[in-house]
């Protein structure tokens, strides 16, 4: 072979190497600028399945930001609420995944929890926990180890297709003077209990509060088995304000033999309670029992409760027991309850949301699901609506057992007050022989069957609800508060 021929072959080889290098660089730049391509380039071998959740692809960059594609294999609709990688949490709004679907979630500020720093084009094996909520509100989490591709930089060319995390709340810092302009900030369960020390104060809940350990055996608020002490009573009423800031108090345990039992025992006419959830509560009292308030004649808005509520009162005394409030004569709007409510032998005036709505009480844009059981006067939303009280734009889908002489109703058992655009939307037909069937004790929606109202958010009774600012629509499910 001549010297000239060898030189030509050498130059050809160099040219091929340069061209291949340019192609690789071009592909890398294209991939880094397109999250779909970034994820698609991940090897199928990195996928993993944990319970009903599959992790099909994931990437992370040197700054601790990334993308993860999650699939729903559960057979039912679920929501992804949080992804934990190492010790870093990324929270999401209710991000609905119907069965068989996938979605890409943004991972922000993972930091050193699964570090790809200086490891571009490498892979890291990290622990991933995915937190979910079922369409019935049940929460769960699933843990696995998965391999994450490290890239130089994650940039979303189409952020509308990526589910973004919730911005973190500012740190909860106890303090404040208790005025409306400078409310006392509550950061733990013991601080919630201390509201009783200043019943006319103004309070703000700065973060989600877990009362489960504090109010149970061994906890600071166990009180020999009585659990949390309700705030206020008929002598010393709560007259201030409580703004939950969209947070919840979870795991509340109360087991009392007294009246006026709930997170707030007795809320007076000047009281204001808003934007708070009482989640997974276990509340027992004698009479006037509810998860949020035993009695209230004040304002309640944009609040909810879940769990179990039990009224011990027996015999001839009314129970006034409800999932949210026991006895109510104030103004309520935009609230819901997912609870099991029951009462003792011979009990009456029991409802899914309220046991009794007395004269002057108004309820607007509310619903309850779950169950409500007693011996007499039990209703899906309210046990009794007395003369001068009103329910508007509300519904119930509660299981209310009907027995002879029970005076049971899907919406209410007895309505001396006014019902406006409000319905029972469940699958049962309530017609107690002791009630005049022409009276509107338990009107049933003509739209047809379970879940129909929440599916048709523009239909009665939800046609007057604010789905832009207050309520969040959920396909094939009940709406929740934003």
Image (cartoon, helix red, strand yellow):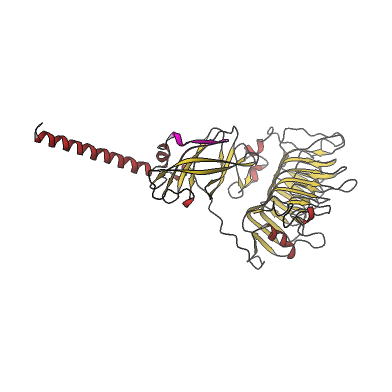
Q: Within the magenta stretch, is there residue 278?
A: no
Please check the rendered image and state whether residue 46 is part of the magenta-colored stretch, yes or no.
Answer: yes
Relative to the observer, which residue lies in front, 89 or 92?
89
- Residue 109 can be seen in this image: no
Residue 275: image location, x then y, percent: 65, 54
Residue at the far front: name it. 1
Identify the residue at image location x=72%, y=55%: 219
Position of residue 146 relative to residue 326, above or below, is above
Measured from the top left, where is residue 449 in percent x and y?
69, 32
Relative image position of residue 478 (x, y in whole percent): 65, 40
Rendered image quadrant of residue 419: top right
Q: Could you say which quadrant of the image residue 369 lies in?
A: top right
Q: Residue at x 56, y 33 (%)?
A: 73
Report the span colored magenta. Answer: 44-57
Q: Position of residue 248 (x, y in %)?
A: 65, 52
Q: Viewed as shown, does residue 421 lie left or right of 73?
A: right
Q: Residue at x 16, y 37 (%)?
A: 10
Q: Nearer the viewer, residue 37 or 1?
A: 1
Does the image show residue 102?
A: yes
Q: Residue furthest bottom?
A: 177
Q: Quadrant of residue 50?
A: top right
Viewport quadrant of the N terminus? top left
């Amino acid at each position: 072979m001549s010297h000239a021929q060898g030189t030509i072959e050498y130059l050809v080889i160099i040219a091929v190497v340069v061209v291949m290098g340019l192609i690789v660089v071009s592909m890398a730049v294209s991939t880094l600028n397109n999250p779909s391509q970034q994820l698609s380039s991940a090897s199928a071998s990195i996928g993993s399945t944990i319970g009903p959740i599959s992790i099909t692809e994931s990437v992370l960059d040197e700054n601790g930001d990334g993308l993860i594609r999650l699939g729903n294999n559960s057979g039912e609709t679920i929501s992804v609420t949080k992804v934990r990688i190492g010790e870093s949490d990324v929270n999401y709004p209710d991000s609905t995944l119907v069965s068989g679907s996938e979605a890409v979630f943004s991972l922000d500020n993972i930091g050193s929890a699964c570090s790809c720093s200086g490891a571009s084009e490498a892979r890291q094996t990290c622990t991933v926990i995915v937190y979910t909520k079922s369409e019935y509100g049940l929460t769960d989490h699933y843990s696995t180890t998965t391999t994450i591709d490290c890239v130089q930089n994650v940039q979303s060319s189409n952020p509308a297709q990526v589910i973004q995390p919730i911005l973190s709340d500012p740190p909860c810092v106890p303090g404040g003077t208790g005025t409306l302009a400078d409310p006392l900030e509550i950061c733990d369960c013991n601080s919630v209990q201390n509201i009783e020390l200043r019943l006319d104060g103004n309070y703000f809940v700065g973060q989600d509060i877990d009362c489960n350990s504090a109010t149970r055996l061994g906890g600071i608020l166990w009180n020999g088995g009585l659990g949390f002490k309700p705030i206020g009573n008929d002598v010393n009423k709560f007259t201030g304000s409580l703004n939950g800031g969209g947070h919840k108090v979870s795991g509340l345990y109360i087991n009392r033999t007294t009246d006026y039992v709930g997170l707030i025992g007795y809320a007076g006419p000047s009281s204001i309670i808003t934007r708070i959830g009482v989640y997974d509560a276990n509340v027992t009292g004698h009479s006037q029992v509810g998860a949020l308030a035993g009695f209230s004649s004040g304002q309640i808005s944009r609040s909810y409760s879940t769990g179990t509520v039990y009224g011990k009162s027996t015999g001839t005394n009314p129970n006034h027991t409800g999932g949210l409030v026991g006895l109510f004569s104030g103004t309520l709007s935009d609230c819901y309850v997912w609870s099991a409510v029951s009462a003792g032998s011979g009990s009456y005036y029991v409802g899914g949301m309220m046991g009794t709505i007395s004269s002057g009480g108004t309820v607007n844009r509310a619903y309850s699901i779950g169950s409500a059981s007693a011996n007499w006067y039990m209703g899906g939303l309210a046990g009794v609506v007395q003369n001068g009280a009103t329910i508007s734009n509300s519904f119930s889908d509660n299981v209310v057992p009907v027995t002879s002489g029970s005076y049971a109703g899907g919406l209410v058992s007895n309505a001396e007050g006014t019902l406006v655009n409000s319905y029972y939307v469940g699958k049962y037909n309530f017609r107690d022989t002791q009630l005049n069937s022409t009276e509107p004790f338990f009107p049933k929606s003509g739209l047809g069957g379970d879940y129909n109202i929440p599916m048709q958010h523009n239909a009665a009774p939800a046609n007057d609800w604010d789905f832009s600012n207050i309520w969040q629509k959920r396909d094939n499910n009940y709406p929740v508060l934003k």
